[in-house]
Amino acid sequence: MGESNDSVEDGFILVGFSDRPQLEMVLFAVNLPLYVVAVLGNSTIILLCVLDPGLHTPMYFFLAHLSFLDLCFSTSCIPQMLVHLRGPAKTISFAGCTVQLSSFLTVGGVECLLLAVMAYDRYAAVCRPLHYAVLLRPGLCSRLVAAAWGSGLLNAGVMSPLTMVLPRCGRRRVPHFLCEMPALIKMACVDARAVEMLAFAFAVLIVLLPLTLILVSYGHIAAAVRRMRSAAGRWKAFHTCSSHLAVVSLFYGSIIYMYMQPGNSSSQDRGKFATLFYNLGAPVLNPLIYALRSQEVRAALRKAPGRLR
């Protein structure tokens, strides 16, 4: 089908998985219940963190924000993807594409720094337990979350306009199921290397710098655990950090795979599935990880029906 027949006025066509109609049906059947689970799971975590006094601690303050970010991730693109999987129309307006890209860049930037903040919280809990209340006082927690949102908004405020204004000479077919920055940049009919280099620089700052802080925090935690003589103390430290480590592995594993490699090093299909996991798999798994690993969350779940009466 020619570009002129596929183009839409003032908008784009999200190709997604349209070249595989049978795969579209399978993806719809799998992703619809997963999206419902993601919404219910993260909404439950947020509600528990607000209503249960036992969860009014820095760790669960950050967890509530993480769940909100996961909701934003999924809701920014999954409902539209589900609509596209079920019908022939694959279009999105220019404004809708801009909002989707901006949301994706904002939330991604916020989550990177928030996970680093949560690693600092775990460092304080394991390595400085007597000073924990001072190191993670409420005012500081709020400022750290505000800084995370500032980094995400800066990322979107710079990269989204630069990406959307690139000339595309009538090209409207986005080889993805959402308006993702690398896919939109590749559609440009001009030399976009400057935008790609700037995107890579932002990725280093927003992705790798927080990851470095996470690794440093866990380096201190590992050293503290090695000094512990009690097996019970070591197990408690592991239990304290295991949920966050699992979430970090899920998040950074997918985001580094997508963005921190040369542009032509992986197939488009693998990139689509990595993005799908980033937007839906992690938001489904994160609440389950914390619910299964955290005694406080399980206790709050048992008490929730009484609090809602």
Image (spheres, rainbow, N blue to C red):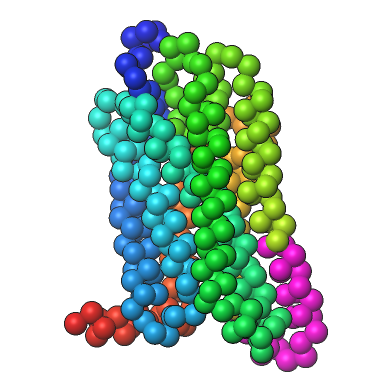
Residue at (40, 25) in percent of width and height: 15
Residue at (38, 63) in percent of width and height: 42
Find residue 11 and report its horizontal and vertical position in percent.
Answer: 35, 22
Q: Nearer the viewer, residue 142 or 45?
A: 142
- Give the quarter of the image for residue 20: top left
Residue 139 shown left or right of residue 36 in the figure: right
Q: Nearer the viewer, residue 162 or 222?
A: 162
Q: Nearer the viewer, residue 66 or 152?
A: 152
Find residue 140 and report its horizontal and vertical position in percent.
Answer: 57, 72
- Give the quarter of the image for residue 227: bottom right
Residue 44 visible within the image: yes
Find residue 232 and report its horizontal and vertical position in percent.
Answer: 66, 90
Find residue 233 and report its horizontal and vertical position in percent.
Answer: 68, 88
Residue 115 shown left or right of residue 106 in the figure: right
Residue at (71, 69) in percent of width and height: 218
Above or below: residue 61 compared with residue 250:
below
Residue range corresponding to the magenta coloring: 214-239
Outermost residue, left direction? 309
Magenta span has 146? Answer: no
Residue at (54, 71) in percent of width and height: 141
